[in-house]
């Protein structure tokens, strides 16, 4: 069980590393994409309690944690910012949830739960420490206009083609 705040932090850190953008759209899009899969707790749980929805697809980490839902969410959020940022946010959510119990990647076609079970508290702690360090370093570098430690003769970053 990765906390929603950790999903947002790690997706923001990944976008800061990959995009190095001073624009706000990639960060907004990735934060939204990182929390959208957990909408099932808000929407499906009351429906299941009232008897309108039942089965594993309507449970937590069911339909909203699938690749099909990912395509829909990424397509929708690409209207507001870069689709790659949305893919990073949604993908990081699925990866971290698959590390702490599993997700139904191919729902509604296959209800199999894919993943492993790692200590979620330790994963939250390590991921948060990494993400906060990256975000603070990136904000510091942006404020003081550093080139992220690259000298003038250094090669271009590996992820320039990803932008």
Image (cartoon, rainbow, N blue to C red):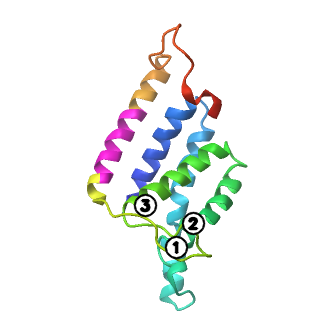
Is residue 100 visible in the rendered image? The answer is: yes
* CA gap, disc 1 and disc 2: 7 Å
In the rendered image, the quadrant that contains the C terminus is: top right
Q: Is residue 78 above or below residue 52?
A: above
Q: Is residue 29 above or below residue 108?
A: above
Tell me whether circle 1 and circle 2 mark residues in contact (CB < 8 Å). Answer: yes
* Residue 131 - label: none
Residue at 36% over, 62% down: 100
Q: Relative to residue 153, is residue 124 drawn left or right? A: left
Q: Earlier in the sequence, mark 1 or mark 3?
A: 1
Residue at 49% over, 42% down: 12
Total numbered circles: 3
Image quarter of residue 43: bottom right
Q: Secondary structure at mark 3?
A: helix
Q: Earlier in the sequence, mark 2 or mark 3?
A: 2
Q: Secondary structure at mark 1?
A: loop
In the rendered image, which residue does mark 2 sit on?
66
Q: Is residue 82 above or below residue 34?
A: above
In the rendered image, which residue does mark 3 sit on?
97
Whole-percent x, y for residue 7 in the image? 44, 52
- Which region shows up in magenta? 123-135
Whole-percent x, y for residue 42 in the image? 50, 72
Q: Relative to residue 53, is residue 125 drawn left or right? A: left
Was residue 65 drawn as part of the magenta stretch in this picture?
no
Residue at 68% over, 61% down: 72
* Residue 62 - label: 1
Image quarter of residue 24: top right
Mark 2, other Cα within 10 Å: few <14 / some 14–19 / many ≥20? many
Q: Main secondary structure of the magenta part?
A: helix
Is residue 163 visible in the rendered image? The answer is: no
Mark 3, other Cα within 10 Å: few <14 / some 14–19 / many ≥20? many
Q: Secondary structure at mark 2?
A: loop
């Amino acid at each position: 069980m990765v906390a929603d705040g950790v999903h947002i932090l790690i997706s923001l850190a990944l976008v800061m590393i990959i995009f190095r953008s001073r624009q706000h759209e990639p960060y907004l899009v990735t934060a939204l994409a990182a929390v959208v899969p957990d909408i099932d707790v808000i929407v499906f749980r009351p429906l299941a309690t009232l008897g309108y929805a039942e089965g594993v697809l309507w449970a937590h980490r069911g339909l909203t944690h699938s690749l099909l839902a990912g395509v829909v969410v990424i397509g929708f959020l690409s209207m507001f910012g870069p689709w790659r940022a949305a893919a990073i946010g949604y993908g990081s959510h699925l990866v971290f949830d698959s590390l702490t119990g599993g997700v139904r990647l191919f729902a509604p076609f296959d209800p199999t739960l894919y993943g492993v079970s790692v200590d979620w508290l330790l994963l939250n702690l390590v991921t948060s420490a990494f993400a906060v360090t990256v975000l603070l370093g990136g904000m510091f570098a942006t404020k003081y206009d550093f080139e992220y430690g690259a000298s003038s003769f250094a090669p271009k970053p590996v992820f320039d083609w990803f932008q």
